[in-house]
Image (cartoon, grey):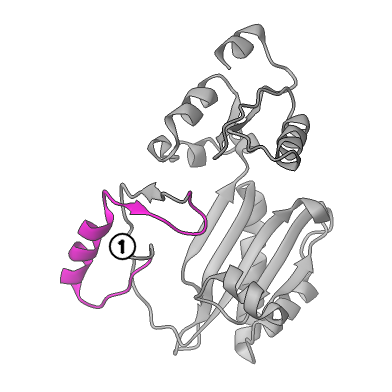
Amino acid sequence: LKGGVHLTKDPKVVGQLAKQMIGYNLATKQTPKEGVKVNKVMVAEALNISRETYLAILMDRSCNGPVLVGSPQGGVDIEEVAASNPELIFKEQIDIIEGMQDSQAQRMAENLGFLGPLKNQAADQIKKLYNLFLKIDATQVEVNPFGETPEGQVVCFDAKINFDDNAEFRQKDIFAMDDKSENEPIENEAARYDLKYIGLDGNIACFVNGAGLAMATCDIIFLNGGKPANFLDLGGGVKESQVYQA
């Protein structure tokens, strides 16, 4: 069974699809090659979609702030759209101090192809999504598809949200829902000691103090033909006990 999203109008098929997904690995472009084990599924009401677009708000380090990204071609893998039809990708850089402007939301709605009353609806949804992005300390809010129904309603049909790990102290309720079983056991072990660990595919271990130096170390290893086995940041305020556990 391919893909993590499936549509059916038959209630009996819902159970069949769940059985084919739960307990098996789901592999996408966002997961490791071997995929991630599916432990649960979400069943939601299916609405009729007359048109699909793509919308995302991302924290872009190169721009030092949030960026609004959209495409009139939604419901498909956005990476494929960017590769085959880059002219269909629209971006709006958002000033982190001034916030999203009405003109930016309106312009993006228009670029996505929302016309007439739907344009204002879409712009209003875009502004609400940006407010959500800020409120929950997100690094990404992706809606795909961001579309319209035959009845003339703009709807966020499906969404994916990533959160800033450094905001856990502010977002305790959200982080309490984190399913640690999806992580690698070694990553959970590192988190117990406030260590930042990410497993990689190489065979050269990295043990570094500071995220910037850790990334630079990985880059140097790659440049010299090696492959890092991990990213491990001890952090600037590391204690002796953390070094021992690392």
Q: Residue at x 57, y 39 (%)?
A: 171
Instruction: Give the extent of the magenta segment.
Output: 5-32
Dividing the picture into quarters, in which one does residue 168 lie? top right
What amino acid is found at the position of numbered circle 1 in the picture? Val
**Residue 180 position in % (x across, y down):** 42, 35
Q: Quadrant of the C terminus?
A: top right
Camera-nearest residue between 245 and 133: 245
Whether residue 16 is situated above or below residue 215 in the rendered picture: below
Q: Residue at x 71, y 35 (%)?
A: 221
| Side (left or right) of 150 relative to 74 | left
Camera-nearest residue between 51 and 4: 4
| Side (left or right) of 32 relative to 133 | left
The residue at the far left in this view is 12
Dividing the picture into quarters, in which one does residue 102 lie? bottom right
Query: Is residue 96 visible in this depiction of the protein?
Result: no
Magenta-colored stretch includes residue 28: yes
Camera-nearest residue between 17 and 225: 225
| Side (left or right) of 34 relative to 81 | left
The residue at the far front in this view is 225
The residue at the far top in this view is 240
Whether residue 72 is situated above or below residue 243 in the rendered picture: below
**Residue 216 position in % (x across, y down):** 77, 35
Q: Residue at x 57, y 50 (%)?
A: 162
Camera-nearest residue between 182 and 228: 228
Q: Quadrant of the N terminus?
A: bottom left
Q: Which residue is mark 1?
A: 43
